[in-house]
Image (cartoon, helix red, strand yellow):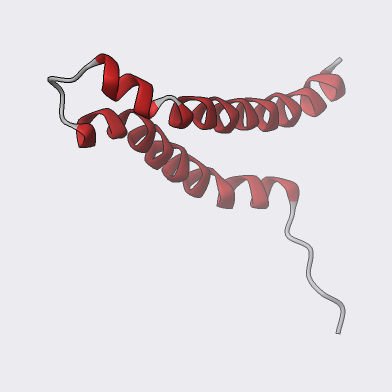
Amino acid sequence: MMEQNKNLIPKISLLSTCLVSASMNAVTGMVPEMAKAFPDVQLSTVEMIATIPSLFQMVGVLSITVPVAELAGIKQAKK
């Protein structure tokens, strides 16, 4: 049971990252429509809907890369 949970966590993590990336692509494509729907709001403010989550995703990926690499083990190239 514990081995099964150990294999499930990386799969869920990878799928959730892909889901966030895919949803951001969907939101980015709708920025012009959102700008039309909110004419009183500046375009740069509407564009932040796509930009800010991408920045947090980048910070999240960078902050977990080292711990995940240490957990999985870094493979060295043979000399």
- Residue 3: x and y in percent read 86, 24
The residue positioned farthest toward the bottom in the image shown: 79
Q: Quadrant of residue 46?
A: top left
Q: Residue at x 56, y 33 (%)?
A: 21
Whether residue 8 sits left or right of residue 21 in the image: it is: right
Which image quarter holds the C terminus? bottom right
Closer to the camera, 59 or 28? 28
- Residue 29: x and y in percent read 47, 30
**Placement of 74 over or under 68, stated as above or below:** below
Q: Residue at x 38, y 32 (%)?
A: 50
The residue positioned farthest toward the left in the image shown: 40
Q: Residue at x 73, y 59 (%)?
A: 74
Q: Quadrant of residue 53?
A: top left
- Residue 19: x and y in percent read 61, 25
Which image quarter holds the N terminus? top right
How many dots with numbers?
A: 0
Closer to the camera, 68 or 39? 39
Q: Residue at x 78, y 20 (%)?
A: 5
**Placement of 9 over or under 60, stated as above or below:** above
Closer to the camera, 14 or 40? 40
- Residue 32: x and y in percent read 36, 28
Whether residue 57 sits left or right of residue 68 in the image: it is: left
Q: Quadrant of residue 47?
A: top left
